Amino acid sequence: MGRRGAVACGHPLTAEVAEEVLLDGGNAYDALVAAFFVACVVEPVLASLGGGGFLLASPEGEKTTLLDFFVQTPARRYSPDELDFEPVRVDFGSTTQEFHIGLGAAATPGCVKGIFEIHRRLGSLPMRELVAPACRLARSGVELNQEQAFIFSVVEPIYVSRSTARELFGSEHQPGRVKGEGETLAQPHLAETMETLAIEGDDLFYRGEIAAAIVKQCQGFGFLTLADLEGYRVEERLPLEVGYRGVKVRTNPPPSTGGTLIAFGLGLLESIRPDRKGHQRSDWLMELADVMAMTQAARVELASQSDSSWPDPLKLLAPEILARYRDEIAGRRRAFRGTTQITIIDGSGSVASMTCSNGEGCGEMQPDTGIMMNNMLGEEDLNPHGFHQWRPSERISSMMAPSIAIWPDGQLLAIGSGGSNRIRTAILQVLVNTIDFGLDLEAAIAHPRIHYEGKVLSVEGGLPSATVDELLAQFPELRLFPGHNIFFGGTHAVIHHKGRFQAVGDPRRGGAARVV
């Protein structure tokens, strides 16, 4: 059993590099920085220098803090007619979802500022050393594994929509298609960009040559200006903490909504005492679906009562609101994006749970940098009042919810997930599986998931057929997936208890884990 730490993330090479950093004496945050840069190389749809994210950090002996480096709305809006902004449909297999891409979909990115801030505050090894593995992989090229090839196939309409992206991500064997499993993706421009950033620092991206290139490309097509980039700041926040059956859960606070919606779901579940062995029973899953439905209804109600782009989600935790929705659940049955996670705990007990996203990518590459910007202004989930209705210079609210849970005996679970609106339900179900049902981490993550949204109950394959039949009788609008599916998120998690580690990468998103 390892003593130096553990990592769970979205790709074997990301995990391997994080392990190497821990073995070389780096702490959890050094490993996190190195892992992020590798993720940008080997998981390019899910991680990008042009995106944003959050870190929940709990350094040994210090307070837990949340660093918010998510994307921000630009300072000025223009007429939609003047923008590079177009819809595309992405096929998840059993369902499709519409996104918007183009330079007009790009919000002010925060990942570069965030990663450098993490390194300044919490890192111990030189940045050049931490960036080096990612640069080597980007130059030599990485063979696409089955999971990454599948992700590319899902978002293919975005990555073949523009010539700049086709040149990098296009297949050598099938013209007009993205690269497939076994093909090599080399990114020499990205390697050069990362090396230069390690030397010159994040000012290069927000004030220097890269900033100038971003602004020039967006002129007449997108919103971003030099003022947007120069004015971007990482925000430090106090994590939201709630109790659930004696376990402390700390998660992403407002203005983002994901953590608060998880807390709301736990608050509703607090009054329900499930059978310890009933995690596959239809009565429990109906209760869970009702909680998801009530969470969605409460979110919609909150939005309808506010004229803000992103209303204060903490209002959902008011006792009278929780009580009202608990009453609606009690005694009844009702029929009614790209993101990656890196979770690391080191041998000293320091915790790093980071979720980052590029949306699905805007489809257009920044010249000579290897960077595709995010499309957060083109995601319906993040624009509840409609596109181009956002307030200027505001941090966009996100479903991302890097979290930790602490048991009374000191056991600590660090977790987070990708998956757009499914983030909150994925994390909620893993927490319940571990706290209520006592499943070990691997079983808690592998267990089939459900997700309720828009009057549709989505159910992952693997449940008993009788359970599925009973769910179908209560939820006529039920969508059944044949097995594990990327749609249901990717909860990469690590447990630390009495000096021992367990790490699990979610198989839905090609997860990998290492205990060091």
Image: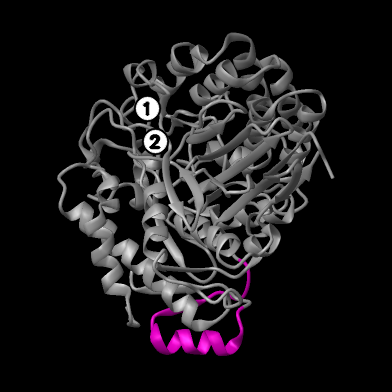
Span highlighted in magenta in the image: 463-484
Q: Quadrant of residue 195?
A: top right
Tags 1 and 2 touching, CB below 8 Å: yes
Residue at the (39%, 60%) spot, across then down: 265
Q: Left or right of 78: which side holds 414?
A: right
Point out residue 153 in the picture as x, y percentages from the top left corner. Answer: 60, 56
Tell me the residue at 61%/54% (across/down): 151
Task: Give the SS element for disc 1.
Answer: helix
Q: CA distance from mark 1 to mark 2?
A: 9 Å
Residue 161 visible, this orientation:
no
Residue farthest to the right, as pictured:
1
Q: Quadrant of the N terminus?
A: top right
Q: Which residue is more in the foreground, 22 or 35? A: 22
Residue on which the image places disc 1: 218
Q: Nearer the viewer, mark 1 or mark 2?
A: 2
Q: Is residue 47 visible?
A: yes
Mark closest to the chain's N terminus, 1 or 2: 2
Tag 2 residue: 106
